[in-house]
Image: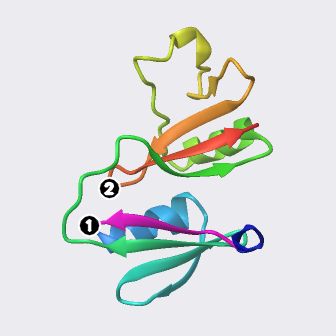
Amino acid sequence: MLISNPIIGFIPTLDADRSRAFYEQSLGLTFVQDDGFALVFRSGANMVRIARVHEFTPNPGTILGWEVSDIIAEATALVAKGITFARYPFIPPDQIDTLGIWSSPGNAKVAWFQDPDGNTLSLSQH
């Protein structure tokens, strides 16, 4: 069954060169290859394919996220790489710390950011 198999994430891009720099240098994913259709990266045991598209409208919600054990350390490292975490008007400001990490009522912590194409990505700690 699928439960024992790694996940493959698919993310659209209009600019493969800009996306490669972001996912490889800013996020630190391991570049595997450019197969002509997509840039292939590894994130742990999972594959992430940054697929070349001619047009698309970014989904308003999160399309890919990473569960991390220390969200403050990960967010701090990403901020140092130039990443800005999103703040949304529907989340009360007192629920978001100075880095942009939201503390949910259930004690999960989440921080959202965008890639160069406007795709929403996230970090979460549960």
Measured as percent of width and height from the top left, residue 73 is found at 73, 41
Q: Which mark is residue 117?
A: 2
In-front residue for pair 18/87: 87
Kindly state the secondary structure of the residue where label 2 is placed. loop
Q: Residue 14 carries which label?
A: 1
Q: Which residue is drawn at 35% across and 55% down?
A: 116
Q: Quadrant of residue 20?
A: bottom left
If the image is split into quadrants, where does the N terminus sit?
A: bottom right
Amino acid at the residue labelled 2: Asp
Q: How far apart are marks 1 and 2 (CA)?
A: 7 Å
Check the image and report above or below for 83 versus 37: above
Q: Which residue is drawn at 26% across and 71% down?
A: 53
Q: Which residue is drawn at 54% across and 50% down?
A: 81
Q: Give the range drawn in magenta.
A: 6-14
In-front residue for pair 32/126: 126
First reached walking from the N terminus: tag 1 or tag 2: 1
Residue farthest toward the left in the current orientation of the protein: 55
Horizontal side of 21 relative to 31 (left or right) equals: left
Amino acid at the residue labelled 1: Leu
Q: Which residue is drawn at 60% across and 68% down?
A: 29
Measured as percent of width and height from the top left, residue 10 is found at 46, 67
Residue farthest toward the bottom in the current orientation of the protein: 35
Kindly state the secondary structure of the residue where label 1 is placed. loop
Q: Quadrant of residue 124?
A: top right
Measured as percent of width and height from the top left, residue 39 is found at 44, 79
Q: Which mark is residue 49?
A: none
Instruction: Find out whether the residues at labels 1 and 2 contact each other: C-beta distance under 8 Å.
Output: yes
In-front residue for pair 66/20: 66
Measured as percent of width and height from the top left, residue 15 is found at 28, 69
